[in-house]
Image (cartoon, grey):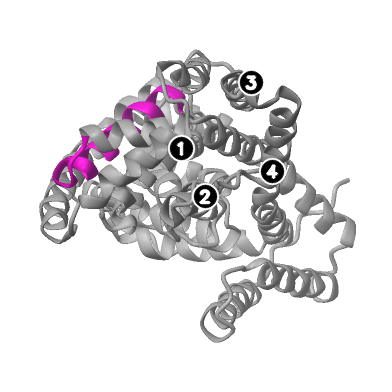
């Protein structure tokens, strides 16, 4: 007979949370470090030791929890490595410089933020990937916005908002499929239910970017250097419509349900081939070696213009290794919390505060945000609250799609706003702007949880089910 799983005491779970928060705060504010790897490792070690000594759990149980968490993060890790290659080859071949030049020729500061937001909405909806969107069109938009003299934090906020629109709404998105699976609803009813919260949030976000754009134009400074940047890029790269092939093929493949990792690798290889052919007169062997080294170490621009070189010198697999290490550390911490029952103890304590539908949805949103903060993982912010609150929603005769919507409104949308969350780290890495700077301008991400919370308390679009349906669903919950 299997022994019952131990549940950690609440005070012990609370101590673990305080420990991580304290270590991260000391690391960031006292040591002025931008890396939270060691705080995560130290917190994991202490929690594991506590579980072995006080909860009488074995190291094997804790290690299995870590490995399960790491396994769930392997696809994002592969995407990270592929994006490193994409950024390097798209920079060196001229794909990103071309997008920057076209953007600078067509866009003015007053409409740039709105355009960046909408472009990322469309691309992320078509691909289902916020990381892919930010790592491709996002890096071109951040570059173009910088040369226009706009606040890069504002531009990054608009890009993040647009990128996570598709991560939340696209049927190709993993989180869009994961949330209804955890809650017990279907994909179609989940997406339709989310339209009610994302629509007003999107309208308000657009208004915000229009206002920021008009303010930004007044303070954008002189645009006299923009033509100089265009001239440098056009003189250093062989720009032309053929450079659209890698991004069009990559985004097209993902849109038609082709796996993201091979699509990204193919996009990198296409840019590699186009770049080699474009520089063939300089010697194919030399160019091949340059591209291969760039895919590993990153592209190093040498145009002679300091601003342009800073803009283009990016990418490579090695540039992603710090992030990959952070993902491993975060997964070990999150896996330990789950395996020791500490995360469950915290959530159960929150559930005891629930008095009605509004407070249940508020608790769900708060838990999603808390798991994002504590485990540094977007997927766990959907999986853990989804499993823990599934029965609570059914017991209150609430349709599962109410839960799945809340999971995405906060779990998915707040993940890039947390600097040490893997999503926040990824956005900061590819855009070159930290989450601590852009979060206040990621309007869609900020507004979705607020709209969801308001709906919960006023009852708007909160769908209920019959007693019979609830009882039937509880049997399989």
Q: Residue at x 88, y 45 (%)?
A: 1
- Label 2, label 1: how far apart the Cα atoms are: 9 Å
Dot 4 alpha-carbon crowd within 10 angstroms: few under 14, some 14 to 19, many 20 or more = many
Judge whether 68 appears above or below 239 on screen: below
Residue 364 at x, y percent in the picture: 42, 52
Dot 1 alpha-carbon crowd within 10 angstroms: few under 14, some 14 to 19, many 20 or more = many
- Residue range in magenta is 107-128
Q: In front of the other: label 2 or label 3?
A: 3
SS at circle 1: helix
SS at circle 3: helix
CB atoms of marks 2 and 4 within 8 Å: no
SS at circle 4: helix
Judge whether 131 appears above or below 434 on screen: above
The residue where tag 4 is placed is 317
Task: Please name the predominant secondary structure of the magenta segment in the image.
Answer: helix
CB atoms of marks 3 and 1 within 8 Å: no
- Label 3, label 1: how far apart the Cα atoms are: 35 Å
The residue where tag 2 is placed is 423
Mark 2 and mark 1 lie on one chain; the one further toward the N terminus is: 1
Q: Is residue 110 magenta?
A: yes
Q: In front of the other: label 4 or label 1?
A: 4
126 lies left or right of 182? left
């Amino acid at each position: 007979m299997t022994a019952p799983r131990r549940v950690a005491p609440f005070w012990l779970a609370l101590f673990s949370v305080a420990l991580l928060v304290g270590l991260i705060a000391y690391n960031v504010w006292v040591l002025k470090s931008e890396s939270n790897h060691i705080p995560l490792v130290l917190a994991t070690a202490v929690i594991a030791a506590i579980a072995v000594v006080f909860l009488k759990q074995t190291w094997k149980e804790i290690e299995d929890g870590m490995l399960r968490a790491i396994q769930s993060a392997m696809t994002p890790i592969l995407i990270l490595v592929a994006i490193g290659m994409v950024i390097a080859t798209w920079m060196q071949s001229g794909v990103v410089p071309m997008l920057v030049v076209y953007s600078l020729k067509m866009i003015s500061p007053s409409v740039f933020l709105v355009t960046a937001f909408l472009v990322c909405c469309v691309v992320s909806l078509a691909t289902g990937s916020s990381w892919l969107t930010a790592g491709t069109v996002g890096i071109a938009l951040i570059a173009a916005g910088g040369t226009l003299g706009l606040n890069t934090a504002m531009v990054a906020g608009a890009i993040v908002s647009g990128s996570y629109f598709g991560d939340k709404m696209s049927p190709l998105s993993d989180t869009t499929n994961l949330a209804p699976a955890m809650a017990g609803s279907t994909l179609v009813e989940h997406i339709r239910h989310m339209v009610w919260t994302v629509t007003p949030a999107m309208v308000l976000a657009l208004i915000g970017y229009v206002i920021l754009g008009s303010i930004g134009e007044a303070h954008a400074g002189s645009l006299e250097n923009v033509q100089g940047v265009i001239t440098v890029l056009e003189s250093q790269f062989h720009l032309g419509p053929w450079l659209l092939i890698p991004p069009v093929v990559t985004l097209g493949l993902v849109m038609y349900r082709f796996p993201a990792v091979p699509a990204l690798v193919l996009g990198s290889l296409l840019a590699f081939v186009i770049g080699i052919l474009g520089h063939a007169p300089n010697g194919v062997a030399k160019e091949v070696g340059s591209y291969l080294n760039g895919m590993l170490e990153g592209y190093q621009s040498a145009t002679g213009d300091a601003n342009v070189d800073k803009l283009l010198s990016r990418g490579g697999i090695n540039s992603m290794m710090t992030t990959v290490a952070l993902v491993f550390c975060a997964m070990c911490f999150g896996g330990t919390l789950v395996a020791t029952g500490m995360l469950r103890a915290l959530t159960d304590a929150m559930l005891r505060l629930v008095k009605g539908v509004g407070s249940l949805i508020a608790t769900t949103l708060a838990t999603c945000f808390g798991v994002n903060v504590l485990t540094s993982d977007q997927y766990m912010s959907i999986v853990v609250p989804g499993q823990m609150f599934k029965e609570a929603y059914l017991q209150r005769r609430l349709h599962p799609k109410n839960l799945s919507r809340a999971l995405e409104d906060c779990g998915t949308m707040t993940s890039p706003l947390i600097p040490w969350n893997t999503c926040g780290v990824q956005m900061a890495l590819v855009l070159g702007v930290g989450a601590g700077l852009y979060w206040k301008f990621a309007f869609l991400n900020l507004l979705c949880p607020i709209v969801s919370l308001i709906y919960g308390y006023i009852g708007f679009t909160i769908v209920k089910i019959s007693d019979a349906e609830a009882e039937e669903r509880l049997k399989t919950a």
